[in-house]
Image: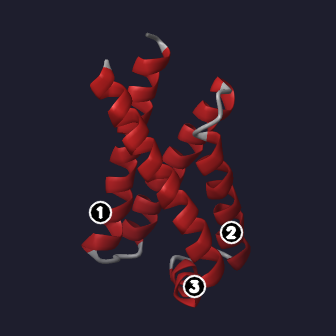
Amino acid sequence: MKAIKITYYATTGLMSFAMLFSTYAYLTKPELKQAFQHLGFPDYFRVELAIAKFIAAIALWLPVRLLKETAYIGLAISFVSAIISHICCNDSTFHTIAPLVVLVILMVSYVTYTKTSNA
């Protein structure tokens, strides 16, 4: 049980850090604005996604099950959508694999969360 808790805290910490960094990068880096244009998304979507990721990074730590699970679902949809977008735009393998790796970390966080909350 201790290993599961450690894995939960480590993966959830990584996920929160990644989402907070994404929020910062989406709002401050001009190259990410260009990347969203390359993918065919309007600029307001970049800002909207940054706000959603910021909220999710916080919600992952709240003791409210509905908010936490909503954050997991929203982030999963975001990463699957990113994978599909990069594939459709024929982007490099890195741009397609990166959200897949983060999705796997999210899944490990969720699985360990369910194991620790049911114990």
Q: Nearer the viewer, residue 16 or 87?
A: 16
Residue named by callout 2 = 45
Q: Which mark is residue 29?
A: 3
Q: Quadrant of residue 90?
A: bottom left
Element type at mark 3:
loop
Residue 81 seen in this snapshot: no
Question: For numbered disc 1, what is the local secondary structure?
Answer: helix
Question: Residue at (65%, 34%) from the top-left corner?
Answer: 62
Find residue 91 and report its horizontal and vertical position in percent.
35, 77
The residue at 40%/69% (across/down) is 86
> Element under label 2?
helix
Could you tell me if residue 12 is visible in this image?
yes
Amino acid residing under circle 1:
Ile
Q: Quadrant of the C terminus?
A: top left
Amino acid at pointer 3: Lys
Q: Nearer the viewer, mark 2 or mark 3?
A: 3
Q: Inspect the image, locate mark 2, and give the three-letter code of the amino acid beneath it.
A: Phe
Lateral position of residue 48 relative to residue 101, left or right: right
The spot of residue 96 in percent (x, y) is: 33, 66
Q: CA distance from mark 1 to mark 2?
A: 22 Å
Q: Which residue is mark 1?
A: 97
